[in-house]
Amino acid sequence: MIDNNNVLALLAFAPILMAGFLLIGFRIAAKTAMPVVFIFTCLIAYFIWGMTGKRILASTFQGLIITFSIAWIIFGAIMLLNTLKYSGAIGTIRRGFSDVSSDRRVQVILIAWLFGCFIEGASGFGTPAAVVAPLMVAIGFPALAAVVFGMMIQSTPVSFGAVGTPLLVGVQSGLDKVILTERLSQQNIEWDYFFRLIVSEVAIIHGICGILMPLLLIMIMTRFFGKKKSWTEGFSIVPFAIFAGLSFTIPYVLTGVFLGPEFPSIIGGLLGLMLVTIVTKYNFLVPKDTWDFIPSSKWPDVWKGNINVSYKEGSKKINSFIAWLPYLLLALFLVVSRIFEPIRSFLRSVKFNYSNILGEQNISAGLEILYLPGGILIFVCFFTFFLHRMSIMKIKSAFSESLKTVFSAAFVLIFTVPMVRIMINSGVNLNEIVSMPISMAKGMSDAMGQMYPIFAPTIGAIGAFLAGSNTVSNLMLSQFQFETAAILNLSGALMVAAQSVGAAAGNMIAIHNVVAASATVGLLGKEGETLRITIIPTLYYLTFAGIIVFIFFYIVKLSDPFQII
C-alpha cells in the first residue's frame, strides 16, 4: 500500500494525463483513446487503490446508465436540428441572422454567448452546446468552430445552470450541512445566510471573469478560423464585445446577490439577448467592417463535420416567428419544467432507479426520461411536426439521421463515463485511501500552502473535467475546499465559491461534454482538436478567477461566520 500523498496524487492524475497525451498530444480519436484510458483507470483502481472487481464493475454499470442519459440529450438536440432542417425552418433562421447582422463576430455573441447562456440557465446537462453548436453550423459556421464556441459558454453561466442545481444540490449536498448548521446556530446564524454568502461570491467572481468572455470568443474565432490567423483581428469589435459581456453579467450578478441561485443565468441571458439584439439593429458599437469565414470550399477537413444541415431556397417558406417558435418553446418548457412543482413532479414521476448496483454502497443511478432535456427536446420536435406541417417521410428522415449520429457518440461515452465513475467511487477500497479526485486535491493543497487559494478554482476544474459536471465536482470537493480554508484560517464560503467557479470553467474541457457536442455536428474523432483550443479559455478563466480569489482573501480580507466561531 502506498501512503505518500504526493505519489497517490500523481497516480490519481495519471488517467487524466494519459487522456490529454492521447487526445491532444498525439491527436488520437476519442473512440480509440478512451477505451485505453478506461482499462488503465481500472488497473490503477484495482492494484493501487484496492477497489474490488465487483465495485469497479458496479461503477461501470453506473456509468453506462449515465451514458444513456447523455445520449438521450444528444439525440433530442440532433432530432430538433434535423426536424427544423427538413421543415425548412433552418433556411428562415439563417436568413434572419443575416438580417440582424451578417458579421460572424456579432452572430457568435448572439447565438453562443447570450442564447447559449440562457439555455444553460434553464437546462444545464450540457444542453447549450448540444443546441447552439448545430444551430451555428446551420447558419454557416464550421463544425469545429461551432463545437469550440459551444464549449466556451460552458463557463460563466454554468454555476447557475439548470435553475441553480450546481449550488442548490452540488454545494449544499457536498458540504456537511448538519454539522455546519449546528456551528452556525452558536451565533444565531441560519444556514441560509451562509449559503447566500457563497452564492453571492460565486456570482461576483463569475461576473468579473465573464465580462471578457465574448471578446475571447471573437479572438479565438479570428485566430483559429480566420483567413489572417490573427488574435488582434477581433479588436475592432472590442466595444461591442465588452457591451455584450456587461449586458449579461450585470443582471446576472445582481440576480445572484439579491434573488439567489435559481435565475442569474436565465435573467442575464434573456435580458442580454434582448438588449444586444436591439442595439445591433441600430448599429450601436457595431464595427463598420464585416468579418466572415473563408469560403466553405476552402475549409480544411478538420473544420468539417459529416452532418448535412443545408437547406433549399426553393423549399417551403416559413415566417421568422414560426421558424423560431420551437426554440422559444424549448426555452419556455425547460424553465417551466424546472420551476413549477406540479409539472416538475409529473415529469420526474416517470423514472427508473437503480440503487446500490451489485450490492455496492452508494453506487446508484437513475433515468428520468421525461425530465431530462432530451425528453423536452423530443416533445418540441413532436410539436414542430404539426406546427410546420411536415410530412411523415420528412420526420422519419430526421429520426433516422439522428439515430445514426447518436450511436457514434455512444461508443465513446460508454468508456469515458464509466472511467469517471470508477475514479469518483474509488474512495471505498481495501487500502483505505481517499478517492482519486480527493487525492489529487490533497496533493495540490499540501504542495501550495498559503498560495493554495490561487489554485482552488483549478481543483474544481479537475473535478468537472473528470465528471463533466459542475454539480458532481461540487459534491465531491466542496467539503474538502471548506476544510482546507479552515486549516489556512481563511473564509470557507469564499473557498467553496472558488470551487464552484473553477468547476464551471472545467466544463470547457470535460471530455464527454466535448464528445456530446461533437456528435451533434458530426465531428466525432476530432475531440483533440477541440480540446487544443478550449484549453486556452479554460486557462484564462482559472488564472483570472484564482487571482480574484487571492485578492479577496489576502487584500480585501473577506471573512465568514466560521472564522469567528
Image: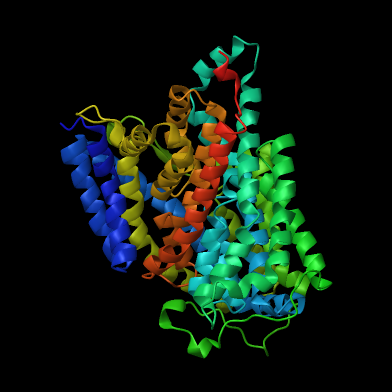
The number of callouts visible is: 0
Is the residue 268 above or below the residue 489 in the image?
Answer: below
Would you place residue 12 above or below residue 359 in this image?
below
Whole-percent x, y for residue 154 in the image = 54, 54
Residue in front for this viewpoint, 548 or 471: 548
Residue 57 visible somewhere in the drawing: no
Query: Where is residue 390 shown, x and y percent of the image?
Result: 65, 75
Farthest right residue in view: 282
Provide residue 311's location: percent of width, then percent of height.
61, 84
Q: Quadrant of the N terminus?
A: top left
Residue at the far front in the pictured view: 555
Seen in the picture, residue 391 relative to 73 is either above or below; the reply is below
Quadrant for residue 289, please give it: bottom right
Q: Is residue 265 visible?
A: yes
The one nearer the camera, 470 or 353, is 470
Seen in the image, is 489 located left or right of residue 332? left
Pick the front one: 49 or 78: 49
**Residue at screen point 44% across, 44% down:** 458
Asked which quadrant contains residue 220, the reply is: bottom right
Pinpoint residue 109: horizontal percent, then vertical percent: 66, 65
| Frontmost residue, 342 versus 216 | 216
Q: Please name the residue shown 48% across and 69% down the image.
A: 402
Choose top left, top right, bottom left or bottom right for residue 115.
bottom right
The residue drawn where x is 56% and y is 29% is: 493
> Relative to 423, does residue 221 appear above or below in the rendering?
below
- The quadrant of the image that shows the C terminus is top right
